[in-house]
Amino acid sequence: MNAHQSQGEQLQPINDVELCVETFGDIAAPTLVAHGDHDPLLPLPHGKALRDAIPGVELMVLEGAGHDLPGRVWDDLVTALVQHTEALVEHAEEGRS
């Protein structure tokens, strides 16, 4: 990516679903993808492509959110993040016993 590329040119690799699968398919860490259903830059099919590419991923669709995090979604997002990280901690503690 460089300063001479248009926004569309910069986003092309991100919007390429096949590249998304190739790039993110190797992620082995438990993953939570939070994606706005009204995102004008990376529409919801992108979030669904990440869901399909990353093994075991959880996709959280933020209803009414765009490419930002409006205050109305904060409580749900924070709750999902806490639950996600608590599950990781529990899993790690089980592995140590």
Image (cartoon, helix red, strand yellow):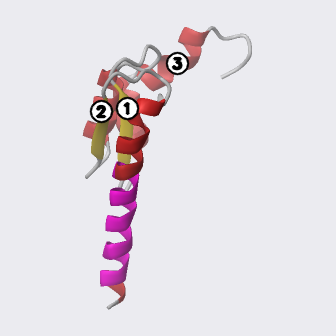
Displayed quadrant of residue 46: top left
- Proximity of marks 2 and 3: CB atoms separated by less than 8 Å: no
Q: Is residue 8 above or below residue 97?
A: above
* Residue 92 painted magenta: yes
Residue bearing mark 3: 11
Which badge, 3 or 1, comes first in the chain's sequence? 3
Instruction: Label 2, secondary structure: give it.
Output: strand
Q: Is residue 80 above or below residue 65?
A: below
Q: Residue at x 39, y 43 (%)?
A: 75
* Residue 8 painted magenta: no
Q: Residue at x 33, y 58 (%)?
A: 83
Which badge, 2 or 3, comes first in the chain's sequence? 3
Residue 43 is labelled as: none
Residue bearing mark 2: 61
Name the one closer to the observer, 55 or 59: 59
Q: Nearer the viewer, mark 3 or mark 1?
A: 1
Instruction: Label 1, secondary structure: give it.
Output: strand
Q: Position of residue 8 (x, y in %)?
A: 54, 10
Residue 58 shows in this picture: yes
Mark 1, Cα crowd under 10 Å, few <14 / some 14-19 / many 20+, is many
- Left or right position of 57 against 3: left
Q: Residue at x 37, y 18 (%)?
A: 43
Q: Position of residue 92 (x, y in %)?
A: 37, 76
Mark 1 residue type: His
Magenta segment's dominant SS is helix
The Cα atoms of the two marked residues, 2 and 1, are separated by 5 Å
Mark 3, Cα crowd under 10 Å, few <14 / some 14-19 / many 20+, is some
Residue bearing mark 1: 35
Query: Which span is picked out in magenta?
Result: 80-94
